[in-house]
Amino acid sequence: MIHQAKAFSSFSVDDIQKAKQFYGQVLGVKTSESMHGIINLDLNDNNHIMLYPKPNHEPATFTVLNFPVDDVEQTVDELTAKGVQFEHYDFEQMKTDAKGIFRYENITQAWFKDPAGNILSVVNS
């Protein structure tokens, strides 16, 4: 049955080499290549995300991948030092601070984009 399947996610990028460099070198995610230029992000517990090249790629307007971290503020500082730019939101229900960090009750989260414009986040684990 499907509930027993090992599920995984995938999303497109417009430049697979830029994606490989960003995810592997900037974010420090282990990457591997498979057929037809597909990149796998090899996450813990044998989970992976598949990135595939798409010439007419349009970035998602929503968060496609969340990275749980122990310390969001420290991670934002580390990624900012590597050139990652965090998104700033000023909505009634969601406002980020000067670093781009959103805090609400038990949630601390910050959003950024990969080179293809896909929205990612770091969130407290």
Image (spheres, grey):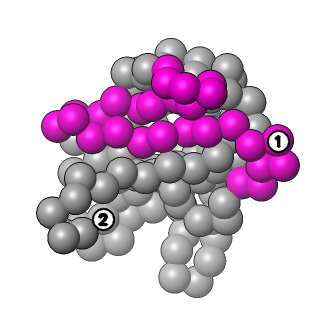
Residue 62 appears at what percent x and percent y?
59, 65
Which residue, as the protein is rendered here, is positioned at the far right? 56
Q: Which residue is mark 2?
A: 107
Residue shown at 53% from the left, 60% from the top? 63
Q: Which residues are magenta?
A: 33-59
Vertical side of 30 occupied by 114: above or below: below
Given contact means CB atoms under 8 Å apart, are the residues at marks 2 and 1 in contact? Answer: no
Secondary structure type for disc 2: strand
Within 10 angstroms of label 1, few (less than 14), some, or many (20 or more) residues?
Answer: few
Q: Is residue 95 visible?
A: yes
**Which of the two discs, 2 and 1, labels the residue nearer the N terminus?**
1
Vertical side of 54 occupied by 63: above or below: below
In depth, the one of 36 and 47 nearer the eye is 36
Residue 72 appears at what percent x and percent y?
34, 44
Report which quarter residue 85 is drawn in: top right
Is residue 51 inside the magenta stretch? yes
Which residue, as the protein is rendered here, is positioned at the far bottom? 92
Q: Which residue is mark 1?
A: 55
Secondary structure type for disc 1: loop
Vertical side of 36 occupied by 52: above or below: below
Residue 95 appears at what percent x and percent y?
54, 69
In depth, the one of 80 and 122 nearer the eye is 122
In depth, the one of 109 and 57 nearer the eye is 57
Q: Amino acid at mark 2?
A: Ile
Vertical side of 98 occupied by 24: above or below: above
Which residue, as the protein is rendered here, is positioned at the far front? 1
Q: Which mark is residue 85?
A: none
Residue shown at 51% from the left, 82% from the top? 93
